[in-house]
Image (tube, rainbow, N blue to C red):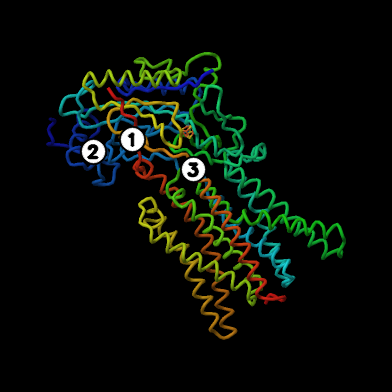
Amino acid sequence: MSVTAFLTDATLCIGCKACEVACKEWNGIDEDGLQFSGFSYDNTGSVGASTWRHVKFVEQAPLPGLGGNSGEQVSWTFSSDVCKHCGEAGCLEACPTGSIVRTEFGGVFIQPDVCNGCGYCVTACPFGVVERNSKDGRAFKCTFCYDRQKAGLEPACAKVCPTESIKFGELEQLRQKADERIAELHDRGMTDANLYDPLDTSVAGVHALFIIRGDARTYNLPPAPEVPTIYLKKAWTSSALAAGLLFGGTLLAFLSAGKNGR
Amino acid sequence: MASRRNLDPTDYRRERNLEEIRVQAEATRQLQVVGQPEKTSFPRATPEDGYYGLPILKKTPWTWEIPLYFFVGGAAGAAAVIGAIADYTGADRELVRHARWIAAAGSVISPALLIADLGRPERFLAMLRVFKPQSPMSVGVWTLLGFSSGATAAAFADFLTRRYGPSIPLRVLENAGQAASLAFGLPFSNYTGVLIGVSAIPVWNRNATDLPLHFAASGLGAAVGMLELMGHHKNRVLHTLGLGAALFESWEGLRIEARSNPDLDPLKHGASGFVTRAGGILSGPVPALLRSGSFFSSRRRSQSLRRWAAWSAIAGSLITRFAWMHAGRQSAKEWKPPVQREAGLSRQATK
Ligand code: SF4
C-alpha cells in the first residue's frame, strides 16, 4: 500500500466538529471535560490525549474572499488539526519500548498494548500532539484509523466531513490536489491561500497537509518544525567528552596525590 | 457596531451581551470580564500572537521522581568512577568502599524512581524489548541496567568478603562488577543531559551541548560532597575534584547568563529562573569560594569550610535538576520559540 495522507482544507471547513465527534465515537475516546476558554469559540484549545482531531477557530480581522464577513465582525476560518504523521517522527524515534511504529500506510501508530507510559514521546513531538492520559497512564494520539485503513476504509473524520474539507488519499496525489485547489482559490481572489507542508525541514514532510489562509503561525503551525533527533550528535559528543573529562580528571587527581591519596 | 453603553461585564445571560463584551475587548485589546484577571490582554489569532497565544508544545508529564532520578543517578555514576579509580590507583580502602556503597545505593534507588514515574509501572520490562540507539531513553535504560548490575555486584562481593573472608570467586565478582560500574558509570552520570537535550523543548534542545557536561559536573560535585560527609573531609583528591566541579559549574552558569537567546528565558526569569540561579550558585561559586578559602585557613576551620562546601554542592546539584525540569515546563508553555524559528514558511502555491 502506498503512503496515505490527510489534506485538510480550511477554506471549506465550517467548524461543525463532526470530525472530532466521529473520531471520539470510532476510537472510544474520553470526554475532554467542560472548560470555557473565555476568549474564543474554541474551548478545547489543542489536540491531546483525548482529542485526536481538533477544530481550530481562527478569528481574524476581516479577510476578503470566500467566507468574508461584514466589516464589524471577525472573519472566521476553521482548520481541523490532527497528528501530522511526520515523515521523520520525533515520537517514534524517542519511544524506548518500540511501541510507536510506522504502519504499512506510512502512518505513525502507538501500539497501546506495548506502551508503558514513560512519556518521552510527549517531549519529542514538535507539534505537541501526543500526550499522556493521566487516568490511563499511557500516551495517546491519532492512530490514522489504522484499523479502518486495514479494512480498506477511510479514517472516520474524513468519512464524516460534510464539506470534504478533510480529504483522505494517496500522499502525492493529495499534494497535487492541494496545488490545484490553491491555484483555483488564487484565481478566485483568495490570494493568501497556501499549503502547509514543511518539506524542507528535518521532519521530512508530513502526512497531514493543511490548506490555510495567510501565515501558518496564526494556526499554531510551526513554520520550521524540528525532529529532536537532529540534536543527537551534539548531545552524545558532549556526553563522550564529559565521560572522558570525568575519567581523565579523576585519574589524574588520584595519580598526582601519590600512593596514599590523602 | 454594537453599542458599548450599559455594558455589564458580569451579565452573561444574553448572547447579545457576550457579543458586546467581545467587541469592546477587541477595541481596547483588554478583557474586563469576571473569571479573567483584570485587564489581561485580549488573545488574538495572528502571526505575532499565534493561535490565541496557546502553547504548541506539550509539557513533559514527568513528576518529581525524574529530576530526583537525575540527581541520584548523576551522583551514583560519579561515585562509581571515583571508587573504581581510587581502587586502581591504590588509594584509601575506606574511600573505595564508601564510593561503592553510594553507587550501589544509587543503582537501587534509580530504577525505583524511574519505574514509579511510568504511567504503567507494571510494564517496565517493555523497555527491554528493544535497544534503540536513536532513543536516549532506550540507551539510558540499558546503561542503567549495566550500571546497576555492576555496582550492586561490586558492593555485594565487598560485603561478603568482609564477612566471610576473601575467596577467588568473590574477587572475580568484585573486579568484574567494579569494571562494569566504571564503564557504565561514565555515561550514566551524564546521559540524562542527552535525554532532555534531545527533545522538542526549546530551552532543553538549545542546550544539547552544554547539558551532558553540566550534569556530569553536577553529579561529580554531589558525589564528592557525599563522600566528604561520610568522613573523607580530609582527603585531598576529593577536595581537588570538588573544586574542579565547582569551577566548571560556575563557568556553566556564566555561559547561560551570557547568552542572550530568548529561548533561554526560563532559565533566567520568573520562578524557574530563580530556582535555576539558586541551584547554580549553590553548585558553582559557593563551593568554589569555600574550597579556595579552606586552602588558607587553619586546619579546623578548613575542615568545616569543606563540610559546608559539600552540603552546598549536594543541595545545588539537587536543585539544579529540579530547575531544569521546571524550566522545561515553562519553555513548553511559551508558544513563540517553536514558531518563530527562522526558516522558510509554508509552501506558497504558484499560480
Ligand atoms: S506530529 Fe508528533 S505525534 Fe504526530 S507523528 Fe509527528 S512527532 Fe509523532
Q: Does ligand 1 reach within 8 Å of label 3's beta carbon? A: no
Q: Determine crowd level at label 2: few under 14, some 14-19, many 20+ residues with C-alpha closer than 10 A.
A: few
Disc 2 from disc 1: Cα separation: 42 Å
Q: Amino acid at mark 3?
A: Ile
- Of labels 2 and 3, the one closer to you: 3
Residue displayed at 45% across by 26% down? A207
Residue under numbered circle 1: B345
Q: Does ligand 1 reach within 8 Å of label 2's beta carbon? A: no
- The tag on residue A230 is 3
Disc 1 from disc 3: Cα separation: 20 Å
* Element assignment for label 2: loop
Determine if marks 2 and 1 fall on one subunit.
yes
Q: Tell me where residue B186 sits by quadrant.
A: bottom right
**Rendered location of residue B28, percent (x, y):** 18, 41
A124 to the left or right of A161: right
Residue displayed at 67% across by 36% down? B129
